[in-house]
Amino acid sequence: PANSQGPAEGQHYTRHTPNAWAPMSADENLGLVYVATGNPTPDYYGGNRPEESRKYGSSVVALDLANGQVRWHFQTAHQDLWDYDIPAQPSLFDFKAGKEAAPAIAIPTKRGEIFVLDRRTGAPLIPVEERPVPQRGAVEKVSATQPFSKVHTMSGRNLVESDMWGLTPFDQLWCRVRFKELRYDGYATPPGQDESLIYPSIGGGMNFGGVAIDPMRRLMVANALHYGTIVEMVPREETDRLLKEAAAKGTHSVTEFDVPQPQLGTPWGARVSPFASPLGVPCNAPPFGRIAGIDLDTGKVRWERPFGTARDAGPFGLEMGLPLAMGAPNFGGSLTTASGLTFIGAAREKAFRAFDTASGKELWHTRLPASAQTVPMTFTGPRDGCQYIVVTSGGHNMLQSPLSDTVVAFRLPGCASKQKG
């Protein structure tokens, strides 16, 4: 980070350093830009990571806008072995719990933890504590602790056998047996040569889209998915053999869960698959998605509810057409308005919703051509003066939802005629 000139001729940037695939945020008054980083590649083995990568992985790094130097950084997952990188832009707001307002930054994570820091220094404004985490079964040295925020968590609690679920008694029993077969010691169970369970999954918790801030109602709106991921570390020789066989068959893709991820340059590949029943539904009990309103100044939850229905989901990828309020897997974020509304797509369901920001009550929803894994936007029409809410309806391959290339805009009925009048 001390080198702000870039590589000299003939040199190159160091590979497998933490990426920054989320949008950045900036505070022009403080002269800082906030960069959210991922975990250093490969995702599930950290034994070869250089010290600089360990230091800045899965962190928010505050850079001086004038010279690019690091002012401070805060790590949300130590020696991240679970692909728990920071998937969304940090959100800026004024923290008002004390006598004077403090410039704050909220950091949503795949872990489901939300960290609220002073954006001048990186010091927590809502307490953070280091807690011991599991060590058993790891193929390398893992961090003894992880940071946990006092902000209401979107990760859910650790799973137990009674949380296993199914559409029928048969797949519920299958999931209970499968759960007992997996090594799972709770949050941050490290990957190993046997099959282990990661919960929340590698997709979250929270994912891209982040949180929405309502400064008037002092609320942060957050949404998350609840799913598990199975990871098994595969020795290098076996990994190379399986990859060669898959290449010969032309079958290696992100949906071929029997084929390990290569994790080149390390002793281990990684076989990664969803924790789902033979019917293709999550083994953990609903809700599979949640949305919550969290107090900006205390971190306590004011309201929380399942988010999304099963209308466009079902066994073997079929659409049941039943609007059961089970919550739905979701990628994407929300938009809050000054009028007290929260708009969001995000769920696998082909729907767009409006909630009352203060209470969490659903006020309106409509159907879309495809699910909306995105963040809505709003603007005032330059000709008619009406407020528009716009959302892209594209679907998402990781949610196995139908794809589209549609952009949909909404406004209140009669707005244009009122403006003319």
Image (spheres, helix red, strand yellow):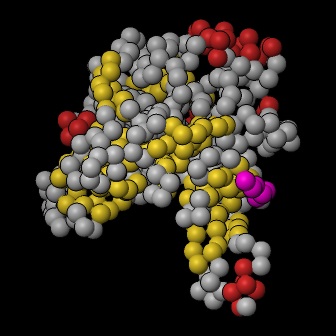
Residue drawn at (20%, 35%) of the image: 51
Question: Residue 129's x, y, as percent?
Answer: 30, 27
In the displayed structure, does residue 381 sit left or right of residue 324? Answer: left
Question: Residue 174's x, y, as percent?
Answer: 72, 13
Q: In terms of depth relative to the viewer, which is nearer, 78 or 271?
A: 78
Q: In terms of depth relative to the viewer, which is nearer, 268 or 107?
A: 107
In the displayed structure, does residue 109 sit left or right of residue 76? Answer: right
Question: Residue 420's x, y, as percent?
Answer: 71, 91
Q: Residue furthest front?
A: 99
Residue 262 is at least partly visible in this image: no
Picture quadrant where residue 330 is located: top right
- Residue 153 falls inside the magenta stretch: no
Question: Residue 353's x, y, as percent?
Answer: 70, 54
Picture quadrant where residue 284 is located: top right
Residue 322 is at least partly visible in this image: yes
Q: Residue furthest right?
A: 321
Residue drawn at (45%, 22%) of the image: 187
Residue drawn at (68%, 55%) of the image: 354
**Where does the C terminus fall, quadrant-wise?**
bottom right
Magenta stretch: dominant SS?
Answer: strand
Indicate whether 277 appears above or below 216.
above
- Residue 367 falls inside the magenta stretch: yes
Indicate whether 186 appears above or below 23.
above
Indicate whether 53 appears above or below 92.
above
Magenta stretch, residue numbers: 363-368
Residue drawn at (76%, 17%) of the image: 171
